[in-house]
Amino acid sequence: MKLLVTGGAGFIGSCYVRTLLDGGYAGYGDAHVTVLDKLTYAGDRTNLPARHERLTFVEGDVCDQELLRDLLPGHDAVLHFAAESHVDRSIADPSVFVRTNVVGTQNLLEACLRTGVERVVHVSTDEVYGSIPSGSWTEEWPLAPNSPYAASKASSDLMARAYARTHGLDVSVTRCSNNYGPYQHVEKLIPLFVSRLLAGESVPLYGDGSNVREWLHVSDHCEALQLVLTKGRGGEVYNVGSGGELSNRQMTELLLDLCGATWESVRRVTDRKGHDLRYSLDDSKIREELGYAPAVDFAKGLADTVAWYRAHPERWSAAAVERGATA
């Protein structure tokens, strides 16, 4: 078995690669992994084993059709993580998101079709559904993205659907809730708050902190992706959630406690443009069809994540100079 993992040096992609190389997925103990990553600010080569015998690393761009057509032959499947993913950055410059998330995905799907790759898992987000005041989204829910980031991911999802329906490409789409865990870039809520609080700095909270998100440990997400890869149906969408919802204010309270800080460290900032109020996934489809169930207890997972950042200041002390993100 030979897999190509795009964006494999990023937060979620590298978790998948490390787990696979460590023998964490049954039947894939001998699988070889090729990681394709552009190594932008969010990709870090040190997220991956330096010289693992079953890992090949290629620095490159999913928008490079010639590179993909040279690289893909011989691979049995592709897991497509590569994406620009931060909402604030998409508001500031949406063109980068359209290029990577839409054009890059179409480029990859075309290259897979041309080179005979048999299986593709396209990793997406719950943000494509927009905002939901109550209840939870099923996979049949209409797409209604509200940020340029979410719109670019919705577009890439539809491109995957088109390649499945038009060309018969065996591609599945996954839509996950907010991920957390070690190795995440400090622009995202949890590592941003943890890094600032551990450094004795204040943390920025959007508006009144009432925005609600569903939190999923990155290792549980990757387990779900492996289930979709091995058991999922082509042309289908699978929601991947946890069932655990928290407002940003509640998350802030937990992080303050874990970092030994108080509300004096919190400063309110002007709310994000078009800020979605609530996300919530109905993931009964992947649970019932593929046997998915998240295994990481949230309280323990969050505490372990904070402990990891505390033990690895080299991962955030320099990067924390970049101060543009908020919760």
Image (cartoon, rainbow, N blue to C red):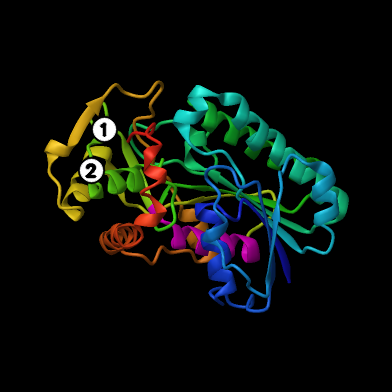
Q: Residue at x 69, y 48 (%)?
A: 235
Numbered label tally: 2
Q: What is the magenta segment's predominant secondary structure?
A: helix
Residue stretch in magenta: 216-231
Q: Is residue 296 visible?
A: yes
Quadrant in the picture for the N terminus: bottom right
Which structural element holds mark 2? helix
Query: Magenta stretch: residue 223 in it?
Result: yes
Which structural element holds mark 1? strand
Q: Is 109 placed left or right of 37 in the picture?
A: right
Query: Magenta stretch: residue 224 in it?
Result: yes
* Local crowd size for mark 2, using a 10 Å CA cut-off: few (<14), some (14–19), many (≥20): many
Looking at numbered disc 2 in the image, what kind of residue is underneath it? Answer: Thr
Residue highlighted by disc 2: 252
Answer yes or no: do the residues labelled 1 and 2 have beta carbons within 8 Å?
yes
Residue highlighted by disc 1: 205
